[in-house]
Amino acid sequence: MRRVLIVEDNRDLAYGLRNNLEIEGYEVDVADDGAAGLARAKETRPDLVVLDLMLPRMDGFRVLRALRDDALTMPVLVLTARGEEADKVRGLKLGADDYLTKPFGLLELLARVEALLRRAGPRPAERTVERIGELDIDRTTHTVSRDGTPVELAPKEYDLLVALADRNGAVVSRLELMRQVWGYSDAVVTRTIDTHVAELRRKLERDPSRPRHILTVRKVGYRLKR
């Protein structure tokens, strides 16, 4: 499954793009400001970035420059509400692979995403089964097992587990989990995350009351101990 990172501060637009890209079979992550988008790109190394130019905290030009300065070569499709030729040229010179001017048609965006990914070639083979203690996470089949026994997880439980696993033992704040797993929806509250963590512990920990892997960091968030 190819990964697409959307960096867009318009929540309605970001939600619509995410929904339609997921329908097309892509794995999609969303960041709602430039700094968060750059961090997510460095962390997850997506196959393609859909990048708005007008972003809070760090504009799209700076994000694009930082990506290329860090030798991150994934295709970048720039979204801009501006019609000035100079902005498009600047984006391309900084390393953008293509651009769309808002408003744009959804079918055109999907076609450009597909073309950029096809041009980039197949994703390099990577280890798909990750071992954490007695847990095995298979990212190809989206399945989890404990000591060789399959464990049935709900989709959001699996996404939450992977989000924690991606940090290699580092603490993940509740806000970061809201952004990555739920797309930073206003409908998601801390209790939603805590409930999903409790379910993961019930299914994956030998003693959920004394977890060994899915740990709480008080007043901060959670981490997955290896």
Image (cartoon, helix red, strand yellow):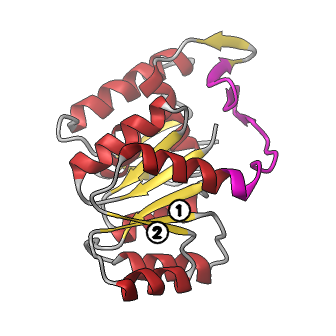
Give percent across and percent down for residue 35.
38, 71
In the foreground, 172 or 178: 178
Mark 1 highlights which residue?
A: 41
Residues rendered magenta in the picture: 118-145
Q: Nearer the viewer, residue 70 or 6?
A: 6
Answer with left or right where residue 124 lies relative to residue 35: right
Mark 2 and mark 1 residues within 8 Å of each other at the beta carbon:
yes
The total number of labels drawn is 2
Residue at coordinates 82% horizontally, 45% vertically from top-left? 125
Q: Is residue 178 visible?
A: no
Taking 84 as reference, is 60 above or below it?
above
In the image, residue 94 lies at what x, y percent? Answer: 53, 84
Res. 68 in view:
yes
CA separation in Å, label 2 and label 1:
5 Å
Check disc 1 and report its element: helix, strand or loop: helix
Question: Which of these two is toward me, 138 or 205?
Answer: 138
Write down the residue under mark 2: 38
- Dot 2: element: helix
